[in-house]
Amino acid sequence: MSIYEEDLRPLDLDKVKTYPLASRPSKVTAADFAEAPAADSTLREFLRTLPNILAVRSLREIAAQVRRARELGKPVIWGIGGHVIKTGLAPVIIDLMSRGYVTAVAANGSVLVHDAEIALVGSTSEDVDATLGEGAFGAAEETGKLLNEASRRGARDGLGLGEALGRELAELSPPHANLSLLCATYQARVPFTAHVAIGADIAHFHPTADGASLGQTSHTDFRLLSELVRRMNGGGVYLNIGSAVVLPEIFLKAVTLVRNLGHPLSDFTTANFDFIQSYRPLTNVVRRPNADGAGRGYSVTGHHELMIPLLAAHIISHDPAQG
């Protein structure tokens, strides 16, 4: 006997309305399921076996938009953080650039540090915990000297920071230039814009640091990126990969500048790739620029060293040049 009041009874289920299962629209169907890959499958065959669900579906759609952008002659801008370089992905991006699927690179300041060090000595990413206590973190002489000299010369010559550093490295003919995005873009005359938060990078506390030059060259690159964003109208693509704060803020300001000047900006694609989805990329890259149907926004969660090669594979697997 229940202790509750007499007229309080569990709800009767006899009259619940049901429907035939087959009549219901469902998000997943058997046609979307994965297939077991064969041991000797080609790249294209392997990609076809992946389930057409969630991240794989997003990768396929983003890849299709990247290919469309190339066909339309629209920018495909790769916005990257330093972790993209530290996980060894420069060769993948350089290859895509040679195929016309990277028409510009936008980078935060950490990219400059890691890419330059790879070009110079073939290694990067120091052990911060081991060097911070004694004040040695970030004190590599060549890194600071190179970046600061590039910013001073770039300011003098009216260049953006990315182009200035690419030029500085190219003049040195570093032994690992083939692994450097800065060297590859400079040689190919592909725009490379650099966006620094002064004080955030190790080169900013070196004796040769010049805040005015860093600010001037980085501001030039903001204006250059804004022009590239303007050209995204009608089919361009912006990918934010591994920058949780600086580049999402820069991109949003570029979008508003373009629209403030009266330029149309619609029918474009944005995507954020990272191993966690943070507020600024989701808001400033994926959602706000695409509000009211202006474009398409995607978010793909996963480690860069896995997701970016997969994206590249999806892009090139349908390239006519691949047969």
Image (cartoon, rainbow, N blue to C red):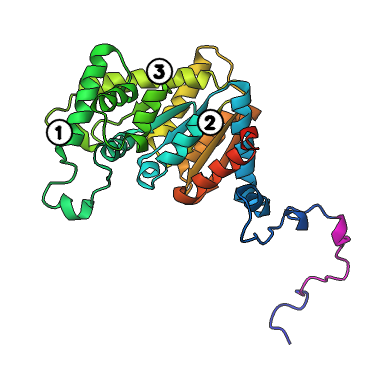
Rounded to the nearest angstrom, the CA distance separating label 3 from label 2 is: 26 Å
Residue under numbered circle 3:
223
Residue 96 counted in the magenta span: no
Based on the picture, tell me whether residue 16 belongs to the magenta stretch.
yes
Is there CB contact under 8 Å for labels 2 and 1?
Answer: no
Nearest to N terminus: mark 2 or mark 1: 2
Label 3 or label 2, whichever lies nearer to me, is 2
Q: Position of residue 8 (x, y in %)?
A: 75, 74
Residue 99 numbered tag: 2
Compute the Cα span from label 2 to label 1: 38 Å
Q: Earlier in the sequence, mark 3 or mark 1?
A: 1
Measured from the top left, where is residue 226 in percent x and y?
Answer: 45, 20
Q: Is residue 181 toward the left or the right of residue 21 in the image?
A: left
Q: Which mark is residue 257?
A: none
Q: Which residues are magenta?
A: 9-23
In the image, taking residue 128 as reference, residue 39 lies left or right, namely right
- Judged from the image, the secondary structure of the residue bearing numbered disc 3 is helix
- The quarter of the displayed image where residue 297 is located: top right
Q: Residue furthest bottom?
A: 1
